[in-house]
């Protein structure tokens, strides 16, 4: 039995057309995988209650830019990698100077610069002095003599008689704290990676039939 093969058309043009189809398929697949992963990470961050502002630090970019390629790639990253990474790994945090970590209570309020307020900033803002209270069981405290306003924040008392004056815990002092792991970025990254071959095939077939 003899078998024969006949090539219909110009083999060079066929290979060239197939290469262009492959370049387009790979480039489209990587673009979709990158934007999909960006959306998944942003959804994780907002779903964990970390806010839309932090979610918007997740960005994606495609390479090479402006042209299709069989070696196309996508990069997804955060413009706030330290913050996002901390919530992704749940690290153990210690004081830089080896003493205490000051955790603000609700009475401390928030920093005017964003993030957690520090004892120094709190004293400058309120004009009150913090006093150290050591406790054997439970965290030690930084307290102040003042009053609570309608928002539950500690402020200086305006009373000349001392009416309403109370000792308010402003900061909890702990030697270390483990940040709760609230994200699983690797899970979504693995899903995006595993979906790439199917995306390439789907886009390649679509390009051939379209």
Image: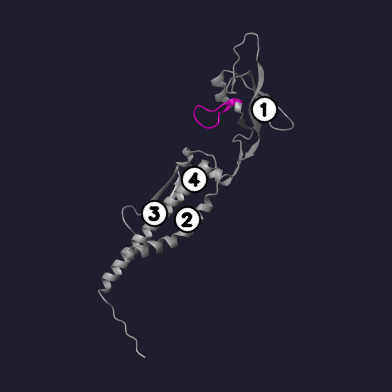
Q: Which residue is mark 3?
A: 31
Whether 107 is drawn above or below 5: the answer is above
Q: Which residues are magenta?
A: 107-118
Say which label, 4 or 1, has the lower sequence index: 4
Question: In the image, is residue 111 part of the stretch drawn in magenta?
Answer: yes
Crowd band around label 3 with a 10 angstrom C-alpha radius: few (<14), some (14–19), many (20+): many
Q: Which residue is mark 4?
A: 43
Whether 130 is drawn above or below 76: the answer is above
Q: Nearer the viewer, mark 4 or mark 3?
A: 4
Say which label, 4 or 2, has the lower sequence index: 4
Q: Position of residue 88 (x, y in %)?
A: 55, 46
Question: In the image, is residue 67 part of the stretch drawn in magenta?
Answer: no
Q: Secondary structure at mark 1?
A: strand
Say which quadrant the C terminus sits in.
bottom left
Q: Secondary structure at mark 2?
A: helix
SS majority, magenta: loop
């Amino acid at each position: 039995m003899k078998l024969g093969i006949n090539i219909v058309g110009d083999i060079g043009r066929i290979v060239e057309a197939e290469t262009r189809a492959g370049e387009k398929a790979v480039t489209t697949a990587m673009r979709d995988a990158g934007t999909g992963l960006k959306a998944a990470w942003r959804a994780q961050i907002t779903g964990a209650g970390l806010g839309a502002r932090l979610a918007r630090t997740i960005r994606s970019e495609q390479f090479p830019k402006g042209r299709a390629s069989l070696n196309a790639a996508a990069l997804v990253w955060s413009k706030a990698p330290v913050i996002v990474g901390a919530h992704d790994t749940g690290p153990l945090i210690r004081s830089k100077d080896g003493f205490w970590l000051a955790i603000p209570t609700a009475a401390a309020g928030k920093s005017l610069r964003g993030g957690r307020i520090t004892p120094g900033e709190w004293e400058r803002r309120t004009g009150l002095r913090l006093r150290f209270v050591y406790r054997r069981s439970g965290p030690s405290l930084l307290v102040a003599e003042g009053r609570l306003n309608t928002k539950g924040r500690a402020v200086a008392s305006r009373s000349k008689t001392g009416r309403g004056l109370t000792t308010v815990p402003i900061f909890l002092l702990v030697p270390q704290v483990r940040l709760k792991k609230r994200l699983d970025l690797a899970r979504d990254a693995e899903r995006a990676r595993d979906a790439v071959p199917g995306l390439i095939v789907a886009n390649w077939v679509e390009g051939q039939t379209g």
